[in-house]
Image (tube, rainbow, N blue to C red):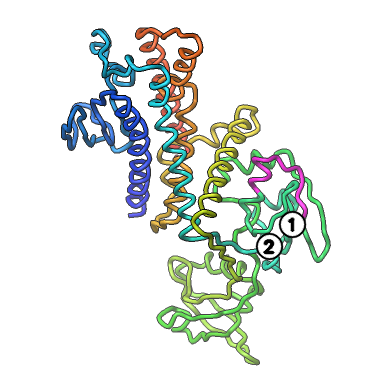
Amino acid sequence: MDILILALQLILSLSILVVLHEFGHFLPARLFKTRVEKFYLFFDPYFSLFKKKIGDTEWGIGWIPFGGYVKISGMVDESMDKEQMKQPAQPWEFRSKKAWQRLIIMVGGVTVNFLLGILIFSMMIFYWGESYIKVEDAKLGLVVDSLGMELGLQDGDRVIRAGGVELKKFSAGLVSKEIIINEAKEIEIERDGKLMTLQVPDQLVSKLTKYENKGKSLFYQSPRQLMNIMEVDPKGNAANAGIEKGSNIISVNGKPITYQHEFRLAILGAKGKTVDLSLVNGQDSILKKVVVSEDGKIGIAMQQLPITIENFGLLTSFSKGGSMAVNFLGDQLKAFGQIFSGKIKAKDSLGSVFSIATMFDTGWDWRVFWNITASLSILLAFFNLLPIPALDGGYVVFLIWEVITGKVPGDRFMEIVNYIGFIILMALMVFALGLDISRWF
């Protein structure tokens, strides 16, 4: 069921992005009276699941549930329709239009994807606002993860700055971003009331980005907190054992417990088993035997730190959404620069659709879904602008060349470079798929 939910989210997300991307080509093409022969969601080799001719355009749904395309008359594209290109150019064809018109048609898709990313980020901020835990509210500091130990972090530390950036939000992701993307060389922490500076080891970036360390971080997203039972599920195992609200667990199977993360680790290590819990309730110390469920729970809720929620008006949301999109794109450009410089290994960063699918939430969290969709939209715009033949960016390069020089690349030349571009893209896809298969095994 989890796999099905992930697959459905992936297909829905990519379908939204592809349809709107292709509309970005379709609308300016029709604006300049260019005939669009096909508009398809998904690919349709040999047959389609649905098709209907409206005007000059065949609208359809293919049977390979990834991607989609528009077929524009008089254009050397992935369809490689050589017979059409042998005929004299017609006024409704792409090749008959002025260079600046063809340029607008080609950049329409990436423009829509970038604007879509801004729109989704903006609407997320407008609807949900921004929620986070303030660093100042995490008074007991962080719970260090394995990679944080290599940095020199300890339980209870409070990260104040990373590089030159002051951190107001408690977030391991923000610290990692400053180290990986912005190449922060040191972080400033508060330990036992004293300020300290930790130097970032040279090898930490490669370890943070290593695929085998996916899921690991510098520190856990939940700050360190004392044990305090706030609620007891009346139908849960804790209630069945007689545990009451307000009790405080001080040990699990004889091992002392002070903080919530210590309790969670102890319980997760006893899934499906019965554990001995020592509790304090007022002045009384009691011992209870409790069955831990198969998902590592006993049916209690503990006190949580206050979550700060900032709400924004519509105009402010669009401003912040635009900044998020630009910053996300900038971070990706920096990351690619580090891949080319060798600081980040390509094999640790690349992945196929299977890697993308695992980014979604198995519980179908709409906030996660739209955040990933917005990010993918920005990435789709970026990748399509790469100057690789068969991508929009490849066509843009030749169109800019035509605008500057007045020389039109020949159809045969465009066919050859499109074949080359197609081979490059297929090789990248096979390589990424191979990486995911090797990771699976």
**Viewport quadrant of the N terminus:** bottom left
Mark sitting earlier along the chain (1/2) = 2
User: For residue 135, which numbered disc appears in the image?
Assistant: 2
Q: Is residue 341 above or below residue 370?
A: above
Which one is in front, 426 or 243?
426
**Does dot 2 land on a helix, a strand or a loop?**
helix
Which one is in front, 29 or 216?
29
Q: Residue at x 43, y 43 (%)?
A: 116
User: For residue 160, which numbered disc appears in the image?
Assistant: 1
Q: Residues within 10 Å of mark 1 (few under 14, many from 20)?
A: many
**Does dot 1 land on a helix, a strand or a loop?**
strand
State which region is magenta: 176-188
Which one is in front, 389 or 197?
389
Q: Position of residue 286 (x, y in %)?
A: 59, 87
**Viewport quadrant of the C terminus:** top left
Q: Disc count in the image?
A: 2
189 is within the stretch colored magenta: no
Q: Is residue 270 left or right of residue 171?
A: left
